[in-house]
Image: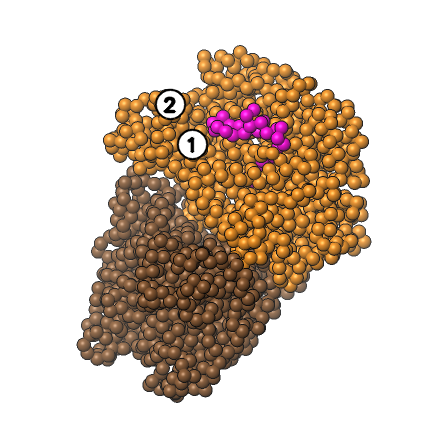
Chain colours: A brown, B orange
Amino acid sequence: SSTEDTRASDPKIENESIFAPLDTFPRRHIGPSAVSAAEMLQTLDPPAKSLDDFVKQVVPSTILSSKDLSVEGPMPESGSMATSEGGYSESQLIARLREIAADNKVYKSYIGCGYAGTRVPEVIKRNILENPGWYTSYTPYQPEISQGRLESLLNFQTMVCDLTGLAIANASVLDEPTAAAEAMTLSVNALPMARQKRKNKVYFVSHLCHPQTIAVLESRAQGFGITIEVGDVLKDNSKRVEEIGEDLIGVLAQYPDTLGGVEDFRGLADKVHKLQGTFAVGTDLLALTLLTPPGEFGADVAFGNGQRFGVPFGFGGPHAAFFAVSERHKRKIPGRLIGLSKDRLGDPAARLALQTREQHIRREKATSNICTAQALLANMSAMYAVYHGPHGLKRIAEKVAKMTKVLAKALTDGGLEIRQPVAFDTIVVTKPGAAMFAQKCASNGRMNFRVIDDDHLGITIDETVGKKQIQEILGAFTTDAVDVVQLAEGLEANTIPEAFQRTTPYLTHPVFNSHHSETEILRYMNHLQSKDLSLLHSMIPLGSCTMKLNATTEMIPLSWPEFSGIHPFAPIDQAKGYMQLIDELEKDLAEITGFHAVSLQPNSGAQGEFTGLRVIRKYHEQQPGKKRDICLIPVSAHGTNPASAAMSGMRVVTIKCDTHTGNLDMADLKAKCEKYSEELSAIMVTYPSTFGVFEPEMKEVCELVHQHGGQVYMDGANMNAQIGLCSPGEIGADVCHLNLHKTFCIPHGGGGPGVGPIGVAEHLTPFLPGHPLVANVGGEKGIAPVSGAPWGSASILPISWAYIKMMGARGLTHATKITLLNANYILCRLKKHFPILYTNENGRCAHEFILDTRKFKETAGIEAIDIAKRLQDYGFHAPTMSWPVANTLMIEPTESESKSEIDRFCDALISIRKEIQEVEEGKQPRDGNVLKMAPHPMKDLVCSEWDRSYPREKAAYPLPWLKEKKFWPSVTRLDDAYGDMNLFCSCAPVETLDDMTGAAAPMPT
Amino acid sequence: SSTEDTRASDPKIENESIFAPLDTFPRRHIGPSAVSAAEMLQTLDPPAKSLDDFVKQVVPSTILSSKDLSVEGPMPESGSMATSEGGYSESQLIARLREIAADNKVYKSYIGCGYAGTRVPEVIKRNILENPGWYTSYTPYQPEISQGRLESLLNFQTMVCDLTGLAIANASVLDEPTAAAEAMTLSVNALPMARQKRKNKVYFVSHLCHPQTIAVLESRAQGFGITIEVGDVLKDNSKRVEEIGEDLIGVLAQYPDTLGGVEDFRGLADKVHKLQGTFAVGTDLLALTLLTPPGEFGADVAFGNGQRFGVPFGFGGPHAAFFAVSERHKRKIPGRLIGLSKDRLGDPAARLALQTREQHIRREKATSNICTAQALLANMSAMYAVYHGPHGLKRIAEKVAKMTKVLAKALTDGGLEIRQPVAFDTIVVTKPGAAMFAQKCASNGRMNFRVIDDDHLGITIDETVGKKQIQEILGAFTTDAVDVVQLAEGLEANTIPEAFQRTTPYLTHPVFNSHHSETEILRYMNHLQSKDLSLLHSMIPLGSCTMKLNATTEMIPLSWPEFSGIHPFAPIDQAKGYMQLIDELEKDLAEITGFHAVSLQPNSGAQGEFTGLRVIRKYHEQQPGKKRDICLIPVSAHGTNPASAAMSGMRVVTIKCDTHTGNLDMADLKAKCEKYSEELSAIMVTYPSTFGVFEPEMKEVCELVHQHGGQVYMDGANMNAQIGLCSPGEIGADVCHLNLHKTFCIPHGGGGPGVGPIGVAEHLTPFLPGHPLVANVGGEKGIAPVSGAPWGSASILPISWAYIKMMGARGLTHATKITLLNANYILCRLKKHFPILYTNENGRCAHEFILDTRKFKETAGIEAIDIAKRLQDYGFHAPTMSWPVANTLMIEPTESESKSEIDRFCDALISIRKEIQEVEEGKQPRDGNVLKMAPHPMKDLVCSEWDRSYPREKAAYPLPWLKEKKFWPSVTRLDDAYGDMNLFCSCAPVETLDDMTGAAAPMPT
Ligand SMILES: Cc1ncc(COP(=O)(O)O)c(C=O)c1O
Ligand SMILES: Cc1ncc(COP(=O)(O)O)c(C=O)c1O
Ligand SMILES: O=C([O-])O
């Protein structure tokens, strides 16, 4: 495309000094060159004179920021741009990051507490974690072009089911503590309706659960009116369970427990079940290769952190937590579930099952708001199991168990006291002055123990521990005279107490028994990858999802041991680099959002919502007056909004939208504000709106709500349209979450990880979430933590930090302008062919817009899904389908797409429009036409019989460039009806759906 | 495949201690599990009782080593295996490598001399250098499954042509000095025949060429009887050229020269041409974005190092050197050339043009032996140009030039003397006590200058230099009071002397003007990659090429700055890590080959041959008696053998092979030995033979040749069949080269890089090649260097080192056994369906064997090429075709392929055999059948018209698993006739070919 010939950069974002570095980033991140952008401005309808004129047609003047964004960049030694304006060049950034990384100290961590050292197989690291083919793909809502990661997630689920001994497992949840919270709310759901309505609801939690789990349960329990009771769940034959009686919703235990012990829970399980409660167990996948699985001793739910299956500490995350339930609860499992179905040709094919449940349709009736999960990490963990197989995993577990025994024996022989017999990987050593001792071991021995109390240390052994490490530990306890080799030889072969020895097989499926050489696993991973469309192939124009470039330089630090090798509860002086980076990121995000402070703890957008609302609640609690618990939410809101509000203990009141403009119905808002003035807690709004428009009256909305004592929660999913032009804080919001995995370049990873920090105004700062194990996190009156780790998924924060630092204030602002231009350019090209749902009074959209495809249902029997599937034949991922409006498509290009790619996409949609017209004109039948039969994988075309109304060439190559560059779906259209009816767990058909929130349709995440 | 279920490892290669690490490597490298191997032994015909019994049936007892291999491994602290037996685990290896790397000091190097700092764009590094899709593919001899890298190499050629201003460029040569040597021999070739036969041949070389270039020319000139005269080529109006007169073969100059100057060569060029000589110019691609290109001032040849286009120093390599010639010389260009042709459907498609030239058919008449080149690095450099585009490259060059001017001005202002006006990037500063000064700058300032002589330092500036570096340099010269910013502002815009300013455009092709955003280049690279079959997809059973696993852990250090960031001529105390690693690798390779010493300098197998033969010649020169220059070479030898012999100045005498056994004809050998007893220099043999058999009489061969005063050169291409079982040294060879890119896991990179070290017996050690710029390289009487860098392609040596260290002695030996087993297993499965050409008396082959497909030409009109192309439809790369025997296929599986993959491959060939049978039986026509029409890309099948004799399904899915796992060729069969006739440079049709050395067929590399 010769129009992109010259990458003449916008003068505003380029340095002129001859000393300025040339490897500047904005021109690499932003798709259209200056020449293309000028062309696009011309092509708009009406054309715009300049980029800034254009921006004024998009963003209401009342909303526009009065000052320029300021982000601290490199010292201007290297160029003429001020440090607050210009960004780091790519090489400058790597150099700076190396400095920061050097301030982290990677000591051996034996802290345990749900995190253990692991060896990430290099082949998996390079070919999944460092491979854009895996990390840039989206949640597999379009199964025909996602079979690879669907298959891998199915492996994950199978692995979890096998190891836990339970019937059904989901495709990951955010972390172990939130998994515990999901288990708690599932327990409520599982109660008979009458019991659910009871005032007193007690969740009885073992004091031997990980402390961060208990803390997160606290934060989640409140909204549901649940009382968390922490105690010894086995004491006196679990008498307390009976005492709680009908108030009991369930019991939670840890196995092995946080101090390393295992207990027999059979009797407890019976008692819980007798009371119709749910028995949940936090557990460890590696331990389960040796221990009787929870499913065999009566657990209804088992969950935990899959981290030690090949995902590094990462200072707390991201890792894939797992969640499994018994047959009885399979319809209640939260999060994403992959199911096997079949395609049009009857061949087996995987898909996201039960997609339309939970918050997507239940909204304020939901008990979980999880969307973005940990797909990328789940795939890594699943692949770790594929690579090692049952035999290999067992050898690892046995080694860990034996090492732990050797250590315990050596310490005991050395005169130390070990608290209980070794069950698996953790021992507790009695050591007066434990804290001081641990500190000394860190500074002198570069190793971390867990300080349990003044007199006790915890030591957790993992697969990275060898003789050297055992000797170092013994050295620290000055018991290293022991000959550990001799000692090891004296131990019995099987170290697991007989009563707990696992007898049932696991991972018997061939996939876990075939790919053990590096060549085999490499090919297996590549084969899966080859089925999936990602940003490697073409634009993924998903409205509300911001599928922008995830630049390599941003991704680099993830692989560095200085970032990946740190335990989340390591002494903070070992994480100075992290602290520096986190400080800077918080500061920059605060500046960008116009807020006073930021918490990076929430590890998804939905988590951010929950956190922000909890903060608002806590704030209100401190104020005099009535309990404020009404949350106003426009009908157009994302399903997570009402779900989060409900989970925070709020009552949701819906606000209408103007059916013509899509804007908030101000009259309705006013009426509701007045009606609930005394009880008003908050409003949740998305800005620009989920319809893709900068509503002009947003400031008035904020003022109104404030007048009535409410707080304004802004869903920042659409922040990409704002940066540098306006900000939630200036507009008047009090809280806002950001999806770093949208706006700030954390890749979507096929469905996670994400990071959902919140920014808050000054008055809310004291309530930002804290952490039980790490000091100085959050505000002075901070709410209980919402994630297991103090800074959530810390190891991916360098991505967003790098993005901001390389773009600089000017680059970020320019990107926003181009993102608006790209969307409006598409809008203008397409509006001659399709109705557009909402635009502002200048005919402009924000960074996305809704293509209204509803009329085709009548004119041609064609629905949005047919267009979506047909787009696959053109090599594109569908836009967001049927959300926020059923049977429409929402298109968001981002600034990273070039004019030529955008033109390809427009050409495809225009070509599809012509195909629809053929049906409208009767030239093609309403059934079995090229849209209805789409997508067309090779196997559908390479067949002798052909009785369709269109030729094969038309199916495969409707536009000429497809002959050169074609991505092939791997299966024909999924049979959703069959899949829902014949879910591999054969559950009942899912509920039917209402209209406004989008029908047979996934949500953007 | 449930047979691979248990990866129970061979007890011989596994540790039993509980402290032994579990991430052991041999079981990951070796495909078949112990269970599979046992099964395979059973399936052999006749079956073998045990692996060791089997080995005895393969390797003659006289050849088998008497002792176990010993390789120093980790201290046995971690396990029970002795350090000489067991290998490092993957994590142990990375830890050890980190230690070694820490001993390298990465200082800023301003040494120049043909190497300059560069910024490798991270997106290119991750997605090409670190991407197995690019690094594990083979030389693109099968164009239908190689269009991606062919297109990229075409970009490389186009880039070189554009920048040099010459008509045609090849797809890379090994390094700049060998490129100079190629220019020299091309000059001989280009002379009229009478002049070629003249006794005196003088190559006149500018004293301003890089010193290593001049040194390598020396080593290459001798064999051709060329005298190198070094001098001032411009002096007195190039009077000396006229004086040399008819003895002149050509002139070589450097532009800009090694001291940074540029001169007008027009007059010189005319004089050279008048004498029918060739004018060659060593040059710099970046400089040529600003300077008049060589093609515009009369150069016939331009060459140089493409390193600074995005390939790091790497302590000397590998980098892609480039080589371009004028229209007049296009048929003489050495190395690989990519040409545009068309496929069966008439669509454009690229291919290796003129494949069958040079050593492959010319053998002892060849003037170049280059095979393996620098494809991977050429792709990186080409992509660097695609990423930056002409505009971006020019900006980089201008910055470099300006920085150099600023530096020169500041130094001059500071009272220092600069030797000549700045032309581009290099200045010479007068500085008495230069060596001491440079040393001080290194130790105090962490920067390296070039010490030209006692009074002069060279400083070369590159794109990584910014204000900070300029100030540091000025600081070293204590002239840093200067305000460089002000100084820079005072300089004129264009820094290039007017007479040398480039006026012609370059890189105008759209490919260099479209992919400048990261998203665009990422998709472009991925699109190219998606067309190529590599080890990611399936086994590549290329006989003589050893396409084994290139493990991720082996590849990791390539990305570390401690290995990539060191200039080859940096003071050696900055490369202590390298020295340690090189020492260990030399020692291990010596042990493995049974030799006394090893030189790692040769950077390909062919280079190794040349080096080994030069060493033999030098040895003979030291002995009393006649000049020994006869080299005996069996007819079965690889084409590089006679070519290398000829280049070393030897006369080649061919030895017959027994047509029945394939073994050397001992009677013929005896006769020739006797006949040439006085003149016998050497014999070159490959072992096991190129026919894939361990000849039983190899020891006798060695003795016989030794008796006649000759030396034994062993081509170690087949070393993979020997390691741990036998060794060239023990058998009686005197020299042997190894292809580290075959046996020792350096990936083939789509046609390079390679490393071809030689091992030599003690008496040859003094003659190992030295280096003019680095002390203590090679032997005391070392031959002149064969590569520009002292240790050749140093940065990839960690790969082979890591392989050896992780396998350990036992792992290596076990791998050899399995490689033999894998080959024999295939042989046994296939021999029921195809004739096998040669086996030993037990019916066994070595690590490879020849499938004799010749009879099908008669029975069905089917040739080896048809089978090769049809294999693509089954998802496999063809075995080596028509070499060493025309119209046959040579199969080598390596130890890394699992039984299940091997079975898939056998099933494919057996299925193809049935397809041939259908033709034989008249069920399918002799023309237009599924073999003749193969391969079948999608575009060939997705069409409405279908009038073939077979259905589409048969074309695409002849075996059931293809529906699940299918690799699609991207074009139909290449039209070789058209390509050769219509070469993009429209050259004459290539010569026809003889039989024994393989016809329309590539050579294994
Ligand atoms: C408007 C809006 N809010 C909230 C979310 C939830 O974010 P997450 O998936 O990170 O939980 C999304 C996700 O797409 C969204 O589009
Ligand atoms: C037997 C033999 N000798 C020599 C060579 C040349 O090696 P290189 O390509 O590394 O120059 C080859 C390459 O395949 C070979 O097979
Ligand atoms: O270099 C070769 O063409 O084998």
Quadrant containing the C terminus of chain B in the rendered view = top right
Judge by depth and name the residue closer to the eye, A860 or B503: B503
Where, by quadrant of the figure, is residue B66 drawn? top right
Amino acid on which disc 2 is placed = His
Placement of B874 over or under A850, stated as above or below: above
Residue B660: x and y, percent?
Answer: 80, 40
Amino acid on which disc 1 is placed = Pro
Judge by depth and name the residue closer to the eye, B335 or A55: B335
Indicate yes or no whether the magenta region holds residue A1. no
Q: Residue at x 27, y 44 (%)?
A: A75
Q: Main secondary structure of the magenta part?
A: loop
| Structural crowding at the residue carrying mark 2, measured as other residues with C-alpha within 10 Å and reported as few (<14), some (14–19) or many (≥20) | many
Q: How many marks?
A: 2
Placement of B232 over or under B723, stated as above or below: above
Position of A271 with respect to B843 (left or right) is left
Is residue B587 visible in the rendered image? The answer is: yes
Q: Which residues are magenta?
A: B752-781
Q: Are the residues under badges 2 and 1 in a single subunit?
A: yes
Q: Is mark 2 within 8 Å of ligand 2?
A: no
Indicate yes or no whether the magenta region holds residue B768. yes
Disc 1 chain ID: B
Disc 2 chain ID: B
Residue at which label 2 appears: B456
Residue at which label 1 appears: B571
Distance, label 2 to label 1, CA atoms, is 17 Å
- Which of the two labelled residues, at mark 2 and mark 1, occupies the earlier sequence position? 2
Judge by depth and name the residue closer to the eye, A614 or A248: A248
